[in-house]
Image (cartoon, rainbow, N blue to C red):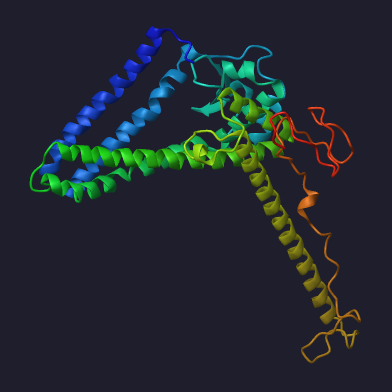
Amino acid sequence: IDPRPLGARAAACALNFLVFLPVGAAGTLALYAALPALGTLAWSGIFLALLWLALSLWLMKPRLALLSEANLRRPEEGEIPPGTEKYLALLSSGDVKVGPEDVLVSTAFYPGLPAPFPMAGRILVPEKALRAFPPKALEVRVAAAALCRVVSSGRSIALLRFFSMSLAVPAALILLNSAGILYGYPVVVRPPLVALVWAGIWAAFWFSEFAALYVERTVSARVSATVAAVTLDARSLFESVEITARGNLDPATQTPWLDFFRPRQNPVSQFEAIRRSIQEMVESATKRRAAAAAGSAGGKGAAEGVAKDADPGRAGTGGNGNGSSGSARPDGADAPDGPEEVSGSAAPSVSPEGPDGGRDGPDGREDADGDPDGPDGREGPGRNGYN
């Protein structure tokens, strides 16, 4: 529920109309005047320029309020957990440096329970998040926001929106040259043709929304998996995910149809996405290590084979003059034993069991809910009913 006074909410709604209605009216008049006077190429260029202008205003409008000096303040002592600085140093080893001085507290209004997020090179921590997240969970969320800042995920998603909105041009042209014929296009230009243009804009906008939504979900899972690997604290990560879901009233049951439209997934879906990302990272690292080990073993074996062939005193084993080399061992295996087998089990595994589940193994300890481990050594379900 928006706790702001009625006047503040009315002013926010009026600002939306003041920004977008003039742009929409000017764009509609420009398109109506350009349809009969300009060719397809020139008309499409004007159309695309107006679309990108409107999208830029739409993306920049909330930033004006969020980045206002009246809505930002330095965190007071003890508000940001002390372990945050260590995680920021670990994640800022590249060209992009994110330090404690870049973490600011935002007092602006946000719907629901927002987590810390990057914006304009800073890490903004809403005051709601300071009260809602435990210290360790807040540390992990600030680290995730810093990683998004390092990889510039927000900029990439904004570029995706711009290119997705470009589809409005061919969509509008298709509608004009199909349904527009019923209204006399291209012989005459009537007002209903502008409605077809807006239909193309509407279709492209929702395509852009869904494209950004699913890319953001994928990036969020990869970022969470990386943060879990850096902080080695998957329990706090899952706790923060569950707190965010409860604060935004996301149900804990899997609802694929609703998840298709909602901006946030339910906790179970998020846990599964993070678990898959961690498995992909472990498998990729295992393959790289195995390939490196095989390459080093092959290089060492080739060097020993060359040395044997160059030794004239080892007749029958190498350098026998007939172009073939024998084996230094009776079983024909002259290559040295390879390194120890590299398996995914050697990497630290992260259990996607949520904050109420734990990392209790087969030692018989109880989980966070007090439920004893099952007969097969795995812990029972947590308070929320999922493992």
Q: Nearer the viewer, residue 298 or 273?
A: 273
**Residue 73 in the figure: left or right of residue 178:** right
Compared with residue 209, is residue 333 higher up or lower down, i.e. above or below?
Answer: below
Q: Between residue 255 and residue 318, name the one nearer to us.
A: 255
| Coordinates of residue 191 in the picture (x, y in percent) | 14, 36
Quarter of the image where one finds residue 271 = top right
The reply to whether residue 39 is visible in this rendering is: no
Residue 350 is situated, as x and y percent measured from the top left of the image, at 74, 41
- Residue at left offset 87%, top offset 33%: 365
- What residue is rendered at 73% in x and 56% in y? 289
Task: Give the position of the C terminus as an image quadrant.
Answer: top right
> Is 106 on the left or on the right of 370, as rendered?
left
Q: Quadrant of residue 22?
A: top left
Which quadrant of the figure has residue 379? Answer: top right
Q: Residue at x 19, y 50 (%)?
A: 177
Q: Position of residue 186 (x, y in %)?
A: 11, 48
Q: Is residue 322 visible?
A: yes
Farthest left residue? 187
> Looking at this rendering, what residue extends furthest in the bottom direction?
322
Q: How many marks?
A: 0
Q: Is residue 97 above or below residue 71?
A: below
Residue located 43% across and 7% down the image: 5
Where is residue 135 drawn, in percent x and y? 70, 21
